[in-house]
Amino acid sequence: MGSEMREPTFWTLVSLSGGRRHGYALMEEVRDASEGRVELKVATLYAVLERLQREGLVAADGDEVVDGRLRRYFRMTGLGEQSLAAELERMESAARLARVRLARRPAIAQ
């Protein structure tokens, strides 16, 4: 992933960094971790997961039936960890630059 991640991708990987998750748990965790900024619908979540699987960032990690419903589990791969770490470094670098520029900026009269 050479460019900036979209928020659904970022938050999905952040959620999977805590271990394997099934789809509904991922939707809840993404909403909570992003403080409600990202609310994934089922179709969007599975589109993100399918793309991340094709890219090798996420892998399927088994299914189970709970209360008559199938849960599909996913986990982040080593490549996914590297990609998330690179995105965090990109974000931190951008934040450092913004802080420096704000600190150097002349005060604006109110």
Image (spheres, rainbow, N blue to C red):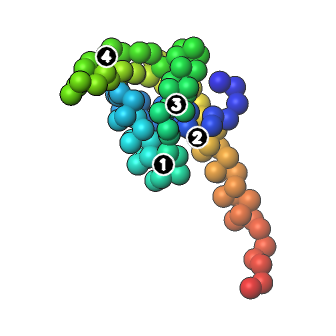
Q: In the rendered structure, which amino acid carries the disc numbered 2?
A: Glu
Q: In the rendered structure, which amino acid carries the disc numbered 4?
A: Asp
User: How many numbered discs?
Assistant: 4
Give the Cα distance between marks 1 and 2.
9 Å
How dense is the environment of label 3, judged by Cα within 10 Å: few (below 14), some, or many (20 and up)?
few
Give the Cα distance between marks 4 and 1.
26 Å
Task: Give the foreground label among 4 and 2.
Answer: 4
Element carrying mark 2: helix
Give the Cα distance between marks 3 and 1.
19 Å
Is 40 above or below relative to 43? below
Q: In the rendered structure, which amino acid carries the disc numbered 1?
A: Ser
Q: Residue at x 33, y 14 (%)?
A: 62
> Does label 3 or label 1 sit earlier along the sequence?
1
Give the Cα distance between marks 3 and 2.
16 Å
Q: Which mark is residue 34?
A: 1
Residue bearing mark 2: 7
Q: In the rendered structure, which amino acid carries the disc numbered 3?
A: Ala
The quadrant holding residue 30 is: top left
